Amino acid sequence: MTTNSMTKNIEYQSRWSEALQGNYGQPAISLVRGEGSHVWDADGNKYLDFLAGIATNILGHANNEIASAISEQSRTLNHVSNFYMHDGVVRLAERLNALTGALTGSGQARTFFCNSGAEANEAALKLSRLTGRTRIVATNGAFHGRTMGALSLTGQPSKREPFKPLLKGISHVPFGDAKAMRKAVTKKTAMVIVEPILGEHGVVMPPDGYLQTLRAICDESGALLAIDAVQTGMGRTGTWFGFEHEGITPDIITLAKGLGGGLPLGAMIALGKNATLFQAGHHGTTFGGNPIACAASHAVLDILERDDLLNRAIILGERIKSNLQSLPGVVEVRGRGLLLGIVLRDEIAVELNSALLSHGLLANSPNSNVIRLAPALNISDDDVAEFSQIFRSTLEQVMLK
Ligand SMILES: *Cc1c(COP(=O)(O)O)cnc(C)c1O
């Protein structure tokens, strides 16, 4: 890397901070292109991408099949609005509904498409109002998005404080604490919303049986159980939505991130009798279910199914855990499938993450002692070996300092 002359990355830093609003921290590098699980920056440096656009590029960068699907769709029909139907949106809803498993027996499922995770949770929030109840219980530390409704669900004070007052009637209880949930949920509760694993909060796992207990609590009180699978969904944790290992059926599932394979696409799937709560005029969005985003999502589902990538996520997750968990300075590697949090003994995650960047590895530090990994599900064995090697040597260096 050039050190004393102005590099292109540094030039972009000053232009970026002049031209864009200050709501994000200043990024260090500007990316130019990607291929599989590698990206290149404006100075020509190559990186192994173990964050994948925050769990979004579920099949890596510049995937040929996704690119062909997008390209073909963009030459055929690229936007119609929801005044008209098109094959891609109908088939995508059918596929997602089927993946929930709710269609077996007399079950039903219906999908609403939007463009992001926050919008998917906004839709869930509005759907829950149609039960006639208004109260909601969410969990501390949870991330459900940044728009005012979704922010009201988000359980992170630093993100909420500057924007109060938020929506009324929403309470937060400790994540993983079923007793606290039981106390908070009443006959007035419209919805309980949880992430199967807290992603943004540092890949925090609930105790086994937590979702089953929440299901029972919601059944007793008549509240809807919404699973925010925006980060855990699309096979990342080894099942389609990240809750199936508990054997429950939620009332609502929200999706985004990996759903469009890098294109903006979100979904709110309502199951059972709630599937038909939305009536004409209740909700909408211009871009939701856009033909190009749907075409990308079909390609994503095709590849995930064809290449058995849900199983591969489990195998590679276990491999990464066993490669790292006995390293000096690592307390544990938690998470499921390819959503992993490396818990460090010392509060060095921020420093380690920037050292990883300068050694050619993209990851992230959601808090001071956790490094989060959310690579593409089609990473190769070589990518995993390269990752383990970079991580090990960088951690050693940072700990010696
Ligand atoms: C990222 C995320 C969201 C918000 O998604 P956006 O597309 O950024 O609005 C919501 N819930 C969870 C669990 C997330 O990880």
Image (cartoon, rainbow, N blue to C red):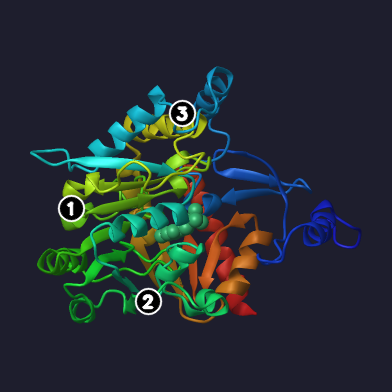
The span from disc 1 to disc 2 (Cα, nearest Å) is 23 Å
State the residue in front, 365 or 136: 136
Mark 2 or 3 closer to N-term? 2
Provide the secondary structure element on which disc 1 rests.
loop
Position of 375 with respect to 96 (left or right) is right
Q: Amino acid at mark 1?
A: Thr
Which mark is first along the chain, 2 or 1?
2
Which residue is tagged 1? 249
Question: For residue 352, which numbered disc appears in the image?
Answer: none
Looking at this rendering, what residue extends furthest in the top direction? 76
Q: Amino acid at mark 3?
A: Ala
Classify mark 3 as within 8 Å of ligand 1 or not, answering yes or no: no
Instruction: For mark 2, give the secondary structure.
Output: loop
Name the side, left or right, on which 141 lies relative to 187.
Answer: right
Q: From the image, which quarter does the N terminus lie in? A: bottom right
Rendering coords of residue 91 (x, y %): 33, 28
Q: Which residue is mark 3?
A: 295
Q: Residue furthest front?
A: 281
